[in-house]
Image (tube, rainbow, N blue to C red):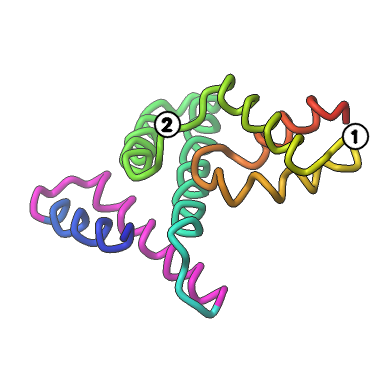
Amino acid sequence: MLREKLQEDLKEAMRSRSRAALSVLRLALTALRNAEVERARPLTPGEELEVLAGEARKRREAAATYRSLGQEERARLEEEELAVLESYLPPPLEQEELARLVEEAIAATGASGPRDVGKVMGYLMPKLRGRVEGAVLADTVRKRLGA
């Protein structure tokens, strides 16, 4: 399970004194615990990936913000943490693969127009957790359905 892998890697980061890995692994484990408390139950593997993907998104956005403010050192640290998190996530979907999956979902749900975006999203999100950001998926679905 993902949590056990994170905990083992945290121990290894402590031994090797890897500052970036240690920091981000602690934060990731805390985010997983907080999500469990919020839901009042253990997380499914898909939900764990979703939490880690959210943490990765935060690092990506923070790096871009720091870079735009001219704070290269902080941006670099955020990108180091992002690299650690991405090593636990499945590879992101290529645009062509995403378009193919959206087409399949539209066919499977019988979606025909902009009002059906939610139906397609509901069909795809459980299958694609951690592999594509919700905003990217929603944008792709909206464009395809003409919304």
The overriding secondary structure of the stretch rendered in magenta is helix
**Magenta stretch, residue numbers:** 15-39
**Closer to the camera, 50 or 77?**
50
Dot 1 crowding, Cα within 10 Å, few <14, some 14–19, many 20+ = few
Residue ID for mark 2:
75
Q: As drawn, is 63 to the left or to the right of 2? A: right
Numbered circle sitting on residue 113? 1
Q: Residue type at mark 1: give it.
A: Gly
Depth check: 12 or 103 in front?
103
- Is 3 colored magenta in this rendering? no
| Element type at mark 1 | loop
Residue 72 at x, y percent in the picture: 41, 26
User: In the drawing, what numbered circle is on residue 71?
Assistant: none
Q: Residue at x 50, y 76 (%)?
A: 37
Residue 75: percent from left, percent from top: 42, 31
Instruction: Decide whether residue 36 is among the magenta residues.
Output: yes
So how many labels did they put on this image?
Answer: 2
Residue pictured at 56% horizontal, 74% vertical: 38
- Residue beneath the point at 43% across and 64% down: 32
Label 2 secondary element: helix
Residue lying furthest bottom in this view?
Answer: 40
What's the distance in space between the residues labelled 2 and 1, CA to CA? Answer: 41 Å
Q: Closer to the camera, 30 or 72?
A: 30
On the image, which quarter does residue 103 sit in? top right
Q: Where in the figure is residue 25, as x and y percent of width and height? A: 30, 54
Three-letter code, disc 2: Ala
Residue 39: x %, y % from top left: 56, 74
The residue lying at 52 percent from left, 41 percent from top is: 57
**Label whose residue precedes the other's in the sequence (2 or 1):** 2
Quadrant that contains the N terminus: bottom left
Vertical comparison of 85 with 139: above or below: below
